[in-house]
Amino acid sequence: MAVIGWIGLGRMGGPMTKNLIAAGHTVNGFDVVPAAVEAAAGHGVVAKSSIAEAVEGADIVFSMLPKGEHAKTVYLGEGGVFDNASTSTLLVDSSTIDFDTATELHQAARDRGFKFVDGPVSGGVSGAAAGTLTFMLGGDDVDVENAKTFIEPMAGNIFHAGGEGAGQAAKIVNNMLLAISLQGVVEGAVLAQRFGLKPEVFYDIAKVSSGDSWPLRTWYPVPGVVDTAAANNNFEAGFSTMLMHKDVGLALDGAKTQGVTLSAAELVYSRLQQLIDDGNGDLDCSAIIGLVDENAEGLPQD
């Protein structure tokens, strides 16, 4: 079994490390939030007080961080991964960050003699806990193959998307599609009810028809229809509005560099921004239904 260094033990990183430990690996973990380290230690992570301690002697290092700026600090900053890890250690960044930062980290790793893979994930907190995440990997063929061995206990699907930054590109586009599909689901759910259709009846029809989508089947925004929907729990975040807003923003930023206009993504981005401006950024992103029907069932009431 391997020694794994892990940076970032939050809502995703914490349960991901639990699956690695269950597979027999030793995980040395660090997070800037002491409570996150303490929680991870509760399921077997060896708590470390710095990046240097977490990466020492590691066969592979994973990072799971909020934004590109955090990834840069963790890898490039003083006392960071590049300053302390052995160049024989494989590095995998599973954060969802912008394409340009991902390619910059690949270049920086190469310049310093490191092997680096960008490996963002899809599946949310529930997938992290269940070990069913989809990993999208970008990097050298050999490095990606070596990373897969360690990723398997955390994954339901593993894809080698392509070269440097390809994993991030796939993740950004995938989540843009998710956000656009979600907007259609919430509008459809509201309109169906206004027509007098029972939510569970319309859901059963749509999920086997051309209106089917992953957010429809997983996040249908009306309580009592889909077990996994945040609507059943006052829209407590499984995938927060803030995170979805960030991801759609990454797609829009990337589109500018590629000369592409994303009209639907721009619309959803503005709607998510409205939720944030209204003080609801911490709610699940499916709470966007409240911008279509402010009386939607399950929404927290002031």
Image (spheres, grey):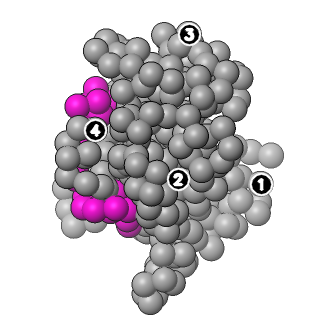
x, y (%) of residue 269? 58, 71
Q: Tell me how far mark 4 sits from mark 2, CA to CA.
A: 33 Å
Q: Are marks 4 and 1 in contact (CB under 8 Å)?
A: no
SS at circle 4: helix
From the image, tell me which residue sits under label 3. Answer: 42
Tag 3: amino acid: Gly
Tag 4: amino acid: Ala
Q: Residues within 10 Å of mark 3 (few under 14, many from 20)?
A: few
Q: Tell me how far mark 3 sits from mark 1, CA to CA.
A: 33 Å
Question: Which stretch appears magenta?
Answer: 148-173
SS at circle 3: loop
Q: Are marks 2 and 1 in contact (CB under 8 Å)?
A: no
Does residue 171 belong to the magenta stretch?
A: yes
Where 11 sits versus 259, above or below?
Answer: above
x, y (%) of residue 168? 40, 59
Q: Tell me how far mark 4 sits from mark 3, CA to CA.
A: 26 Å
Q: Residues within 10 Å of mark 1 (few under 14, many from 20)?
A: few
Does residue 32 belong to the magenta stretch?
A: no
From the image, tell me which residue sits under label 1. Answer: 279
Residue in the image at 51% along x and 24% along y: 56
Q: Residues within 10 Å of mark 2 (few under 14, many from 20)?
A: many
